[in-house]
Amino acid sequence: MTKLKTVNIKGKEYVEVNERLKHFRSTFKGWCLTSDVVDLSETRCVIKATIFDENGNIRATGHAYEKEGSSFINKTSFVENCETSAWGRALANLGIGLDTSVASFEEVANAVKQQAAPAVKPTLDETKFNNMLKAIEQGKGDAVKAKLSQYDIPEHMLTVINENLKSK
């Protein structure tokens, strides 16, 4: 089999869908790759890609699900990205570009990004702030201390909480 161009993602070589598609078109003459929208709404898309041989027999399929706004590309092109992902999965299921993973480049890159991104803490709002102060007044300072790490706390609120904890 022809060696396909790869990109390195976290130490693993990955064959992008465009490379898989070029190989498919040049190698499998008379074969066909189709896309069918299984589900489409304003916020999500499911596409099934099917590969047929020259006799019309199904040789491989691939499904993809994308959610609008779930990644940078999906803010404007979640349907197109879904189709590309479905193609990539069908081509991988046919054995093209399949060395370490069936996942699309976007799936792999997004998973890497999710793993690398620190968890975003919610900002402590006024209601929770006031509830913490009440809890400190009720002698529940240890419970408040345990919850502090769960929030991004504005400096002025943190100062007040710490002052109240010290005075109790």
Image (spheres, rainbow, N blue to C red):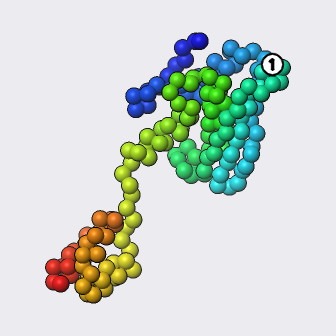
The N terminus is located in which quarter?
top right
| Secondary structure category for the residue under label 1 | loop
| Other-residue count near label 1 (Cα within 10 Å), few / some / many at <14 / 14–19 / ≥20 | few
Q: Please say whether residue 36 is visible from this viewpoint.
A: yes
- Residue at the spot 81% in from the left edge and 25% down from the top edge: 57
Could you tell me which residue is drawn at 61 percent across and 46 percent down? 66
Q: Quadrant of the C terminus?
A: bottom left
Above or below 135: residue 65: above
Task: Identify the residue at image location x=24%, y=85%.
Answer: 139
Q: Looking at the picture, how far across and down is residue 82, in whole percent?
A: 64, 41
Which residue is most to the top?
Answer: 1
Residue on which disc 1 sits: 54
Residue 58 in the figure: left or right of residue 121: right
Residue lying at the far left of the rendered structure: 166
Say what amino acid the circle numbered 1 marks. Glu
Picture quarter containing residue 2?
Answer: top right
Which one is in front, 60 or 29? 60
Q: Quadrant of residue 38?
A: top right
| Residue 161 against residue 55 in the figure, above or below | below
